[in-house]
Image: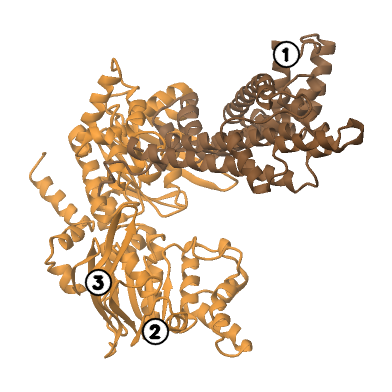
C-alpha cells in the first residue's frame, strides 16, 4: 500500500475504534442506570450509615443523580472523554489513580505471558515441522490440545506446588519478584500458547502443501530458511488474529492468576470492586477492557496490509497487462 | 564422471505412495545440452519422476532404482549435498506460475534467496546479476519486477521470473513441469520459445514434462511416452511422432487435435436449420472495478444457425466469460439484445429466465468442482426434472437412465457419487444433466480443458453424435484453436471485449485477416513443420 492510501485507511479505522469505545462506555452506563436505584442513593439511604434527608439532598445533587438520565449520560461521557473516570465510592480516591496503580503489575504479567505464549507456540510449531515424522511431530501436534484441556488455575496450582514449595525456585511471599512473575506468566501463557500453536501448525501445514514451498525447496533452501520465509511469513496473518483474540483471554485469565499467585493488579481490583459494588471502578474497568480490545484489534487491522501485500490497495504502478 | 556419460541417467526407477506403484521400471537418459520430453496423461507418473529427480516427493513415498546425475546417484546422496545440487545444477520450472512464488514476499527477496547459492560478494552484486537474468528471460523492466510482489504480475511474467530464478545459478539441467498449461495460448508459445532459446544458446539440457504430444514433438529431440507408470515407447521425437510403434502412442497421436484437424469432418456435415438459434446484436457490457471502468464486452454481434457449432475464442480478459453470463441472463447488457431460440434473454425476470433455461443449458469448465459431491449421479441428472415439474413423477427415473445412456455411461453409475467417477465420466454426467430438459442450445464453456486428450476426444465424439441425433446448437467457448478447428462451423475471435474477426472456421483458419488471429494460429504447435525443418537442417549439415 502506498503511503497515500495507508493514512486514510488508518485514520478511518481509528475513527471506528473511538466510536466503539464510546459505545461500550455508554452501554455500561445504560446497564447501571436501568438497575433499580443507584449506588450512591443506596448507600446514603442505608439506615446504618445514618444520613439525614437534609444531608442526602446536596450529595445527590452533587453527583447529578437528580437530573434526567440523558443529561447524566452526557455529563458522564464528556468526563470520560476527558479522562476523568470519577471517584471510587469505597476508597474515596480518583478511579484513574487506582487504575494507574494496578495497571503496571498486570501489564508486566500479561506482557510476559504473551511472550511466553509466543515462544512456546513457535517452538512447538517448529518441532511439528522439523522433528522426525512418526514420533516427534506426533507429540508436538498433541501437546496444544493437551494443554488446552487443562484449566489455567490447575496449571498455576501445580506450578506453585512444584516450583515454589518443592523446588523453591520462587517464594509465594514475594509475588511480584522476577521468578514469581515468570511462573505466573507461564500459568497464564500456556493455554494461550496452545491456541496460537494450533492455528500456527494448521497454517504451516497448509503452506507446506503449497506449490511455492516445493519450488523454494527445489531452489535448494535449508529447512530453517524454508520454515522462516515460506511457512512462517505467509502464516503470520491468522496468527496475528489469534494473538488479538488471546489478549482478551490474558485479561480474563489474569484475574484468576493474580488471585492464585497473590499479586495485586487489575484482576484483584476487579474482584474487590465486584464484591463491594464499587460502580465507578467497575464501569471504568469495563471501559478499560473495551479500550484494550479495540486497540488490539485496531493494531491487528493496521498490521494486516503490512504483512500481506495483497491486502494493500493497488499501488500507483498498477497491474500490467 | 566419464567424458561421454549422459548428464542424466535414470535406471529402473520405481516410485510408490501406497501399495500401488506410481512409477515402475522407468529408464531414460538425457545427454548434456539435449532435450527430452516426458509425455503422459494424468496418472501416468510423469510428475512423480520429476519430483523424485528434484527431491520433492512427499514424505512416505518409496523410491527404488538409480538416478544418476553428472555421475552421482541422487537417491543415495546425503541430504545436505543433494540440497546444494538441487539449487545449483538442477533448475525447476513449475506448472502454475501463479502459485509458485510466495505471495507475501517480493520477487526480489525470493530471487536473492536463489542468488545466495552463487559466489557473489554482496546483495548489490546479487541484485545486478538478478536484473541481468530477468532481462535475459525477456522481462522488459527488470528493476520494477524486482520490487514487485507476485500478485502484481501476469501469469506469463511470473513464468519468466520463475525461469529466471531457475537459470540464476547456471544449472546444467532445467526441469519444466508442464510449464505452459496454466497460460494463455499466445503466452505458451513465447514461454516454450524462451526455453528452447536458452537450451540452444546456453547449452542447458531441458527435461520437458507435458501431456501434449504436439508440444513434445515440436520442442524436444527425444520423447518418452508414459502410461500408468510404465514407459510405452521412447525414441527421437520424429520417430515416435511419425511412426508410433506402441498402441498407446498411436492413440495419443490420433487424439491430439493439433495433429488431426480433419478428424471429425465427416461427422460435421450436418443439417442446418433455417433460423438462428442464438442472435447477439451489438451487445455492450462494462463493470466498475475499483477505481476504473472495465469494458468487458464492446459491440459484440454474432448469429448461430440452429444445428451448428459456433466457437468463441479468446485469451483471459477477452470477454468470453462475460458473454456467457449475458447469454445465460446472469448479467444485463448495457446496450444491445440477445435472443435464444427466438425469445429475448431478459436478465432479472425470473419467469422469462425459467423459460430460457429450457432452451439453453450450460456445461461448465471443471467437472471436478461443478458437481455437488454429496449427491448421487441419478440425483444430479434428475434434479432439473423435479425443479421444472417435467412429466409425471413415475416417468422421471426412465428419463434419467435415458440421458445417462445418451452420454455413453452405464446405468450402474446412477447410485455413485461424483467422487467415485473419473474426470471424463463427471463431464458426461454434467452434459447429461444439461440435456435432460431437452434444450436446443448448449453453451459449452471450455468443457474439455480440465481433461486428458484421449478423454477429450471421447467427449468431442459424443458431442458430435448428440448434435446429429438431437439437432443441438452448440456455443463452444475455448482458448484451444486446434480443438475449435476440429469441431466448429463458425468462429468469433475476441480480444479485450471486442470482436477481432469472425466467419466460417475454414476461412478464418486458412486466411486470417487480423494479425491477432494469425498470432493465435501460430500458437498451435506444428510438429510436422518442426520435423521438416529438422530434416532441412540435417541436410544443411551441423549448425
Q: Is residue B326 visible?
A: yes
SS class, disc 1? loop
Residue B373 or B410: which is nearer the viewer? Answer: B373
Between circles 2 and 1, the one closer to the viewer is: 1
- Residue located beneath label 1 in the image: A176
Residue A199 placement: quadrant: top right
Q: CA distance from mark 2 to mark 1?
A: 82 Å
Q: Is residue A301 left or right of residue A80?
A: left
Examine the rendered structure and indicate whether residue A269 appears above or below residue A162: below
Find chain A in the image and tell me its colour.
Answer: brown
- Indicate which disc residue B262 carries: 3
Find chain B in the image and tell me its colour.
Answer: orange
Residue A253 or A140: which is nearer the viewer? Answer: A253
SS class, disc 3? loop
Name the residue furthest front: A54
Between circles 3 and 2, the one closer to the viewer is: 2
Q: CA distance from mark 3 to mark 2?
A: 26 Å
Chain identity of mark 3: B
- Residue B169 picture location, percent across and down: 30, 26
Sequence-earlier tag: 3 or 2: 3
Q: Is residue B344 left or right of residue A70?
A: left
- Indicate which disc residue B440 carries: 2
Q: Is residue A279 left or right of residue B534?
A: right
Examine the rendered structure and indicate whether residue B170 appears above or below residue B318: above
- Residue B250 picture location, percent across and down: 34, 61
Amino acid at each position: 500500500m502506498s503511503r497515500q492510501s495507508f493514512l486514510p485507511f488508518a485514520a478511518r479505522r481509528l475513527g471506528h475504534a473511538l466510536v466503539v469505545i464510546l459505545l461500550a462506555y455508554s452501554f455500561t452506563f445504560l446497564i447501571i442506570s436501568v438497575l433499580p436505584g443507584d449506588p450512591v442513593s443506596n448507600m446514603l439511604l442505608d439506615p446504618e450509615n445514618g444520613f439525614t434527608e437534609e444531608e442526602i439532598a446536596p450529595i445527590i445533587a452533587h453527583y447529578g443523580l437528580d437530573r434526567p438520565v440523558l443529561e447524566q449520560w452526557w455529563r458522564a461521557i464528556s468526563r470520560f472523554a476527558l479522562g476523568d473516570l470519577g471517584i471510587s465510592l469505597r476508597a474515596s480516591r480518583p478511579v484513574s489513580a487506582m487504575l494507574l496503580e494496578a495497571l503496571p503489575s498486570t501489564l508486566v504479567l500479561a506482557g510476559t505471558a504473551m511472550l511466553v505464549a509466543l515462544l512456546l507456540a513457535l517452538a512447538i510449531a517448529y518441532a511439528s515441522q522439523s522433528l522426525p515424522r512418526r514420533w516427534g511431530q506426533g507429540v508436538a501436534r498433541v501437546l496444544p490440545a493437551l494443554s488446552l484441556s487443562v484449566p489455567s488455575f490447575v496449571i498455576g496450582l501445580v506450578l506453585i506446588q512444584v516450583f515454589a514449595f518443592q523446588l523453591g525456585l520462587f517464594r509465594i511471599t514475594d509475588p511480584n519478584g522476577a521468578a514469581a512473575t515468570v511462573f505466573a506468566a507461564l500459568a497464564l501463557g500456556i493455554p494461550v500458547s496452545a491456541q496460537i500453536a494450533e492455528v500456527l501448525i494448521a497454517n504451516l501445514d497448509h503452506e507446506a502443501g503449497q506449490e511455492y514451498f516445493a519450488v523454494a525447496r527445489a531452489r535448494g533452501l535449508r529447512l530453517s530458511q524454508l520454515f522462516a520465509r515460506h511457512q512462517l511469513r505467509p502464516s503470520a496473518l491468522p496468527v496475528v488474529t489469534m494473538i488479538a483474540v488471546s489478549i482478551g483471554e490474558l485479561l480474563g485469565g489474569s484475574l484468576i492468576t493474580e488471585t492464585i499467585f497473590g499479586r495485586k493488579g487489575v484482576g484483584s481490583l476487579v474482584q474487590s470492586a465486584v464484591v463491594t459494588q464499587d460502580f465507578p471502578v467497575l464501569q471504568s474497568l469495563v471501559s478499560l477492557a473495551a479500550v484494550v480490545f479495540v486497540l488490539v484489534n485496531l493494531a491487528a487491522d493496521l498490521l494486516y496490509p503490512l504483512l500481506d501485500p495483497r491486502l494493500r490497495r493497488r499501488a500507483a504502478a498498477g497491474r500490467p497487462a | 564422471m566419464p567424458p561421454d556419460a549422459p548428464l542424466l541417467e535414470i535406471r529402473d526407477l520405481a516410485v510408490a505412495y501406497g501399495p500401488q506403484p506410481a512409477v515402475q521400471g522407468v529408464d531414460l537418459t538425457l545427454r548434456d545440452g539435449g532435450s527430452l520430453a516426458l509425455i503422459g496423461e494424468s496418472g501416468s507418473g510423469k510428475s512423480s519422476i520429476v519430483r523424485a529427480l528434484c527431491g520433492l516427493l512427499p514424505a512416505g513415498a518409496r523410491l527404488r532404482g538409480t538416478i544418476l546425475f553428472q555421475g552421482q546417484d541422487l537417491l543415495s546422496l546425503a541430504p545436505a549435498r543433494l540440497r546444494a545440487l538441487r539449487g545449483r545444477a538442477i533448475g525447476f520450472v513449475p506448472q502454475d506460475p501463479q502459485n509458485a512464488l510466495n505471495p507475501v514476499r517480493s520477487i526480489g527477496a525470493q530471487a536473492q534467496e536463489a542468488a545466495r547459492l552463487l559466489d557473489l560478494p554482496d546483495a548489490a552484486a546479487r541484485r545486478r546479476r538478478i536484473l541481468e537474468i530477468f532481462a535475459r528471460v525477456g522481462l522488459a523492466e527488470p528493476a520494477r519486477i524486482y520490487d514487485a510482489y507476485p500478485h502484481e504480475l501476469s501469469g506469463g511474467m511470473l513464468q519468466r521470473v520463475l525461469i529466471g530464478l531457475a537459470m540464476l545459478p547456471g544449472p546444467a539441467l532445467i526441469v519444466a513441469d508442464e510449464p505452459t498449461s496454466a497460460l494463455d495460448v499466445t503466452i505458451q508459445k513465447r514461454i516454450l520459445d524462451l526455453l528452447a532459446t536458452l537450451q540452444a544458446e546456453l547449452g542447458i539440457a531441458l527435461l520437458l514434462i507435458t501431456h501434449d504430444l504436439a508440444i513434445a514433438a515440436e520442442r524436444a529431440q527425444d520423447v518418452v511416452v508414459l502410461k500408468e507408470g510404465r514407459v510405452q515407447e521412447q525414441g527421437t521425437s520424429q520417430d515416435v511422432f511419425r511412426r508410433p510403434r506402441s498402441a498407446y502412442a498411436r492413440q495419443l497421436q490420433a487424439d491430439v487435435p493439433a495433429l488431426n484437424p480433419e478428424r471429425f469432418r465427416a461427422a460435421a456435415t450436418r443439417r442446418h436449420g433455417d433460423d438462428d438459434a442464438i442472435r447477439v446484436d451489438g451487445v455492450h457490457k462494462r463493470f466498475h472495478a475499483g477505481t476504473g471502468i472495465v469494458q468487458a464486452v464492446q459491440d459484440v454481434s454474432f448469429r448461430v444457425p440452429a444445428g451448428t457449432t459456433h466457437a468463441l475464442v479468446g485469451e483471459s480478459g477477452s470477454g468470453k466469460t462475460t458473454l456467457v453470463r449475458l447469454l445465460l441472463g446472469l448479467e444485463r447488457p448495457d446496450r444491445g439484445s440477445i435472443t435464444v431460440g427466438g425469445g429475448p434473454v431478459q436478465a432479472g425476470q425470473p419467469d422469462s429466465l425459467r423459460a430460457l433455461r429450457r432452451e439453453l443449458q450450460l456445461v461448465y469448465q471443471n467437472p471436478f468442482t461443478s458437481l455437488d459431491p454429496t449427491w448421487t449421479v441419478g440425483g444430479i441428472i434428475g434434479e432439473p426434472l423435479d425443479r421444472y415439474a417435467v412429466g409425471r413423477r413415475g416417468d422421471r427415473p426412465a428419463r434419467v437412465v435415458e440421458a445417462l445412456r445418451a452420454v455413453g455411461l452405464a446405468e450402474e453409475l446412477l447410485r455413485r457419487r461424483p467422487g467415485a467417477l473419473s474426470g471424463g465420466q463427471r463431464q458426461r454426467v454434467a452434459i447429461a444433466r444439461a440435456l435432460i430438459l431437452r434444450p436446443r442450445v448448449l453453451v459449452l464453456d471450455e468443457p474439455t480443458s480440465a481433461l486428458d486428450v484421449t478423454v477429450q476426444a471421447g467427449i468431442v465424439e459424443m458431442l458430435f453424435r448428440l448434435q446429429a441425433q438431437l439437432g443441438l446448437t452448440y456455443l463452444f467457448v475455448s482458448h484451444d484453436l486446434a480443438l475449435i478447428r476440429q469441431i466448429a462451423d463458425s468462429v468469433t475471435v475476441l480480444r479485450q471485449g471486442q470482436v477481432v474477426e469472425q466467419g466460417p472456421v475454414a476461412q478464418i483458419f486458412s486466411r486470417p485477416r487480423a494479425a491477432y488471429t494469425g498470432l493465435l494460429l501460430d500458437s498451435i504447435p506444428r510438429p510436422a513443420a518442426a520435423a521438416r525443418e529438422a530434416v532441412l537442417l540435417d541436410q544443411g549439415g551441423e549448425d
